[in-house]
Amino acid sequence: MVQKDQKIAVQFALASVLLWSTVATAFKLALTSSTLEQLVVVSSLSSLFVLFVIYAFSKQKQNLFTLFKQTPKVYLLLGNINPVLYYYVLFAAYERLPAQIAQSINYTWGIVLALLSIPILGQKFSKGDAIGLTLCYVGVVIAITRFDITNMPEFDSVGLGLAFLSTLIWSSYWLLNRKTNAPALESILICFICGTPALLFIAINNWHLFTFNSTNLMASVYIALFEMSIAFIFWLKAMSYAIRTAQISSLIYLSPFLSLLLINWVLKEPIYFSTVIALITIMLGLYIQKRMNQSLK
């Protein structure tokens, strides 16, 4: 049993937030030197290795095969969603869109999760869901239109569709994940193992497009470490040490704004005032939805 310590919890949570703040920039940088297929394969397999090392050195771990046998069909489906399908769609969206737009849409996955929970889990559509939904998609409209519907910037329509699709895929993954009983680390590791055949299939069929150099390898490994692996583990650590989980959960709202700074500094992508307002609106929607739904429990 981990001894609760709010100070340590905050430190782990802030570390996670800082790492997650870098991933939008990392995605765009990686896609300048890697094909979409290569980035999915190399980052996912690198993450599998990192997760396995973390699992191997974990003091309290459960047998992976025993856990897999409990719900094999679910894990096989989950493994093809995450990492394969989700990251393929997400990276494709980032490839086609400015980082600030792809990121803004991606942060609405929480409200999509709440909406999917209504028909799938039989949950009621609450006032908090309605307010959250409205604010989140008002934020998306602000980001896309930049407050000027008559003279909207022309974003790649396929990219926008892929960004919205990524929120649906990620939400579906977490809903399906409820059907498993494994601890978080073991669960995601099993998923990555189950996704490996699909990753190898992609690699074999696209090998002629793969070009390896220090730049794209470092970018892929960075994404594997800080988007798919270590940030996730740090967040789990934060929640395990937390005395007041609400305080820890609120820190996640810092991530997109720190990310905008990096997008501007590193990618030299001009950050529009409308994007900042859009993210504030989206984060406010997620926060209100969460708080109002908590008050119903």
Image (cartoon, grey):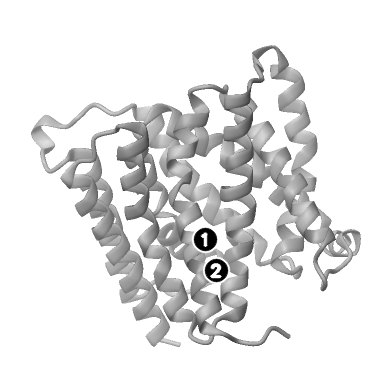
Quadrant in the picture for the C terminus: bottom left
- Residue 172, percent from left and from top: 57, 54
Residue drawn at 89 percent across, 65 percent down: 63
Residue drawn at 45 percent across, 32 percent down: 28
Q: Which residue is mark 2?
A: 12
Where is residue 130, by image quadrant?
bottom left
Q: Is residue 131 above or below residue 25?
A: below
Q: Amino acid at mark 1?
A: Ser
Within-10-Å neighbours for mark 2: few <14, some 14–19, many 20+: many
Q: Which residue is mark 1?
A: 16
Q: Is residue 102 above or below residue 131?
A: above
Q: As drawn, which residue projects farthest toward the top?
A: 208
Label 2 sits on a secondary structure element that is: helix
Dot 2 and dot 1 residues touching (CB under 8 Å): yes
52 left or right of 30 in image:
right
Residue drawn at 73 percent across, 85 percent down: 1
Q: Amino acid at mark 2?
A: Phe
Q: Nearer the viewer, residue 244 or 187?
A: 244
C-alpha gap between disc 2 and disc 1: 6 Å
Q: Nearer the viewer, residue 79 or 39?
A: 39
Q: Is residue 15 above or below residue 100?
A: below
Q: Is residue 242 above or below residue 102?
A: below
Q: Tag count in the figure?
A: 2
Label 1 sits on a secondary structure element that is: helix
**For residue 86, which numbered disc appears in the image?**
none
- Residue 207, percent from left and from top: 72, 17
